[in-house]
Amino acid sequence: MVSPAAAAQVVGQLVAAIEAELDVLVDRIGERIREEIPDFRRLPADALANAIRGNVGRALSALRDLRPPTGQELERAAAIGRERAEQGLTVDAVLHAYRISIGAVWSRFGELARERGADVSSVLAFSETLWLWADAVMDVVASAHREVELELAREEQQRRDAFVLALLTGTIDAAELRRECATYGLDPECDYIAFRARAAASANGAGRSLPHRIALALAGDDGLVTALDHDLVGIAARPPVSMAGVVTGLGPRARLSDLPNAFALASRALQTALAFREEGTRSLADLSIRPAILADEALGDAFEARYLEPLSELGRLGAELETTLRAWFDEGMRVEDAARTLHVHPNTLRHRLRRFEEATGASLRRPTDLVELWWALERRRWRQTSASAAPGS
């Protein structure tokens, strides 16, 4: 064993010997990096050689003094990590290249140490300094690389989100649409389905955001999706599947240039499905005339006044008749089924239907009266449900 000062002197002499043949070492490292890491073949040979020379040179400088990396060396390592991320090189590829460089330095030092009969203390001092320096530098490189990766991913996601929203709202011009279609793998000659989805429990509140897996399932492999308020909006090549706890409004199939109109219909379908507490995927066609119930207040007021207000004058009997009518419609206007639901005899139910006709002058055999009565009942049910779900109710 020798003193630390003597070991440092031996290490310094061996480092000087490596520096004297640095060009050969750099060439050897560059060849191995290109052979083992295909990503680095995209870099110009002279640029890679300069980077290797800089990294090895800084390592040798630390080894000569048996010291850890300086702040300046760590800043340079961070800059390299950021640069490699911006060049599209993966963090694994970058760290692999560093290990090749450090391994080459260690291997050459071992050869020289054996040739010159270096003592164990000198070899241990060199080894400990080299790997501690390398670990510190590679930690900084990896951290800086990942920061840039995350930033690039956020920027890409923001661009994608902006494109999807512009596509659905019609704020993108034809030239940009053609250009972005190629970027995001869309076919301008194909039809797509616009959709808008929300958690079923969010009908009358601020709502909760749907998880990422739901977004992926809605859009499928060929679609795009983003968030709008607490909704998921986007396009899909195939109709999204129904999922428990999720309400999805669908628009008709449309070319990309016609998606704004289709998205407006999807939004209206979602609004209607939420209002009537329906789950799954719904287009306007699936919702019958319920979208009109929401939209036409004047007509709804008229139908309620025509068919339901006379029942309020009957007091408890009127409320019983309204409950009976709801059950009758819900059971497909089948008297026996509705009677079982209400736990009454079918003749009792028939009597109540006649009492309704007498109180209102309506005929349950006239199609127009049936449609208008159903409209009035559905509108009242929607308004009652909305009122019960409102904050503070």
Image (cartoon, rainbow, N blue to C red):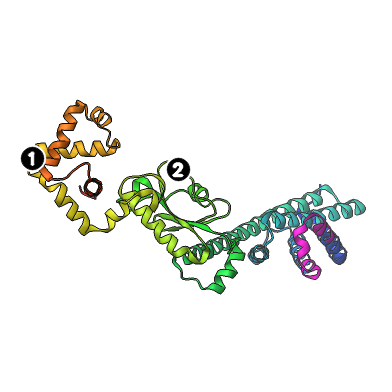
Q: Main secondary structure of the magenta part?
A: helix
- Tell me which segment is drawn in magenta: 31-49
> Is residue 60 visible from the viewing direction of this image?
no
Q: Which residue is mark 2?
A: 243
Q: Position of residue 156 (x, y in %)?
A: 56, 63
Q: Residues within 10 Å of mark 2 (few under 14, many from 20)?
A: some
Residue found at x 28% / y 58%: 295
The amino acid marked with disc number 2 is Met
Q: Position of residue 289 (x, y in %)?
A: 31, 51
Residue found at x 20% / y 47%: 393
Question: Residue 297 or 375: which is nearer the viewer?
Answer: 375
Question: Residue 179 or 4: which is nearer the viewer?
Answer: 179
Instruction: Judge whether residue 236 is colored magenta.
Output: no
> Is residue 89 visible from the viewing direction of this image?
yes
Q: Is residue 3 left or right of residue 366?
A: right
Q: Which residue is mark 1?
A: 315
Against 171, residue 276 (above or below) is: above
